[in-house]
Image: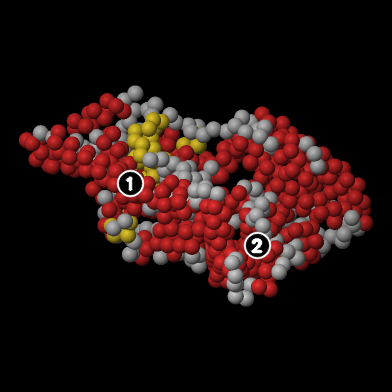
Amino acid sequence: MGPIQLEPNKVAAELSKLGEKLAKGMKVLKEVPDVHYGASEKEAIYKEDKLVVYRFKSPHKVTHKTPLLIAYALVNRPYMVDLQDDRSIVKSLLAAGHDVYLIDWGYPDPSDRYVTLDDYINGYLRRSVKAVSKHTGVEKINLLGICQGGAFSLCYASLYPETLQNLITMVTPVDFQTPDNMLSHWTQDMDVDLFIDTLGNVPADLMNWCYLTLKPFRLLQQKYVGMTDILDNPAEMENFLRMEKWIFDSPDQAGEAFRQFIKDFYQGNKLLKGGLKIGDKAIDLKAIKLPILNIFAEQDHLVPPAASRALKGATGTKDYTELSFKGGHIGIYVSGRAQREVPPAIDQWLRKRG
Amino acid sequence: MAKTGSGVFKDWEALHQQWWNAVSDGAGKFVQGDWRNGAKAFGDLFGGKLGEGTDAATERFVSGTKQYLDWVEKFSGQLASGAQFPKDAAGWTKLFQGALGPMGEMKNPLHDLFAAMTGDGARGFEQFFSGWPNPADWVKGEVQGLLGLPAFGYTRETQERQQKLAAAWLQYQDAMGAYNRLMLEASQKALGKFESLLAAREAQGRKLDTLREVYDLWVDAAEEGYADVSLSPEFRAAYGDLVNKQMVVRKLVQTEVERFTGQFGMPTRTEVDSTARRMQELRREMRALQERLDAFEAAQSTPKAAKPAVAKSKSTPSKAPAKKAAARRSR
């Protein structure tokens, strides 16, 4: 029979099971409540335009004197870091005694079409850090930048190092032109000026579509075939649907910020190569001398590990630590392994550095 | 181990109908209708009932799973109809290819897969024009012959714009053709990869004994084939060209829409953009002024004698604010 050995009885059992799961599926789906997210209670401490900086209220005693601000990417919603009770990096950090803050960039609308990277980094991010600093009464805070938010954090750290104690980057692209970076490859011949002049803000659906087509067979089909395995399990289905909600709950991208991000970061690779300016300020990674913890995911198809690893040696710090996580771009926040490995690693690293 | 000889086909025939009925019945129950038309059946019967997020996810599930069930039906059907069981990777690949359906070689293999995805941003560009006169119709009709001719008369400018749009549409179609050819190449590579993966497993003595395992291996192969093509210089050029040509068409259409809506006194995209630009400039100015004011007020409220002490304690938390903050933070 060669490499495939299908036996009638086994196939019959397999398909009968599939039929049973499908039959139960609709009943389960009807019973699954509309999914919600957020495991930790939080309060807004700063608002500006659509941006909100939240402080998570901890049921535990805050033992770390330096607060931790999380800057997520613009392209997805930040509640991924506090998705649900048993999948929350924030919850684990709170339990470890950290005072955790989060930037929610909001959903840009057509009135935000001219918001630039200068506005995001020299404006929103700088004032968010200031707000946390003011709220806690310390002059330096810890900054945790995730994905695109990590790239922003690197820019910020090079410009305003006096406001930061430590920098943590998670799944952060630094070298935007590694050979395995499909997303980057696709953008190289795009006329970004024409793209933004035409679209204005970049629609979220278009962004999602682009991400899905990075792995179309897995993300458009196999994932849903796999869903049949849990179709009769309400708890698993609720988790699945919550993830789906997050994946497709994406903000539009402010046109001008997107224009510069693609041109300077993806097409020009200027964050690593040099020559990047945010507003009128030149970015020099060598100016970052504070301790850096760089966490990346080994199976990351959006930010390949090599894209993150490029940070090593690119900055001026003498205290650089890498953490390699066995998982993907999403798993690094929500997998069971992530809950066990990532927050404790962050906590221990910070604990050593104050 | 499966029986050999003619007996095995009898088993397959006998069981096929039974198991297929089970799957069809289950799938039918899931969509409350004919699973082959699952997305529609689901939409008709359950639209809006399960909450926004759940509905969208379920619709994607129905669409994605339908393609799997299509394949299962065809693949297992081939076995049940007495097709000779292949003896090697090449034979199995051929049998597999026969069941691929839309993912076969005659058309863009990703077309149906992409069509399973719903959502505005995912729609084919053709749908962008739904509800609008299709520029392609102009090409098909009399205008086609006029594309290269100079426009004249009272409607000269309108003719020129239409010619430009029709020409842009044709260029976009060319770009789409080039992209589709690469997708076809990806599907052909996928079959080659599938055969290689099967052969590698055979060499290692590893067997696939469920339909799902066969399908999962196919997905691995398909992704590998797709990645090979989509990381190629040709794809980079074709992708860029497709996006750029589509933007040219969109922009020309937008211009027409602006002209049309402007005639009815409605605000245009250009006007909205202009307002947004001014608003953003005002926001920046306001923030800058606010920060200057904050700094000024802070300087005013700081006792002169305390100034050197503040400067000295720059690297350490300032105690008074920290105390206040700690009070705020305690729950």
Q: Chain of mark 1?
A: B
Q: Residue furthest top?
A: B331
Q: Look at 80% across and 55% down and name the residue there.
A: B75
Assess whether mark 1 and mark 2 are in contact (beta carbons under 8 angstroms): no
Q: Chain of mark 2?
A: B
Q: Look at 34% across and 28% down and name the residue there.
A: A61
* Front residue of A213 and B297: B297
Q: Look at 67% across and 32% down and name the residue there.
A: B49
- Find residue A81 and report its horizontal and vertical position in percent: 46, 40
Residue A245 higher or lower than A268, as above or below: above
Total tally of numbered discs in the picture: 2
Q: Which mark is residue B249?
A: none
Q: Look at 41% across and 48% down and name the residue there.
A: B275
Q: Tell me, yes or no, if residue B194 can be seen here.
A: no
**Left or right position of A128 against B191:** left
Residue B113 higher or lower than B191, as above or below: above
Question: Which amino acid, mark 1?
Answer: Leu
- The residue at which mark 2 appears reads as B135
- Find residue A179 and report its horizontal and vertical position in percent: 49, 66
* Front residue of B77 and A75: A75
Q: Secondary structure at mark 1?
A: helix
Question: Which amino acid, mark 2?
Answer: Pro
Mark 2 vs 1, N-terminal side: 2
Q: How is the image coloured?
A: secondary structure
- Find residue B95 and report its horizontal and vertical position in percent: 80, 61
Classify residue B197 by image quadrant.
bottom right
Q: Secondary structure at mark 2?
A: helix
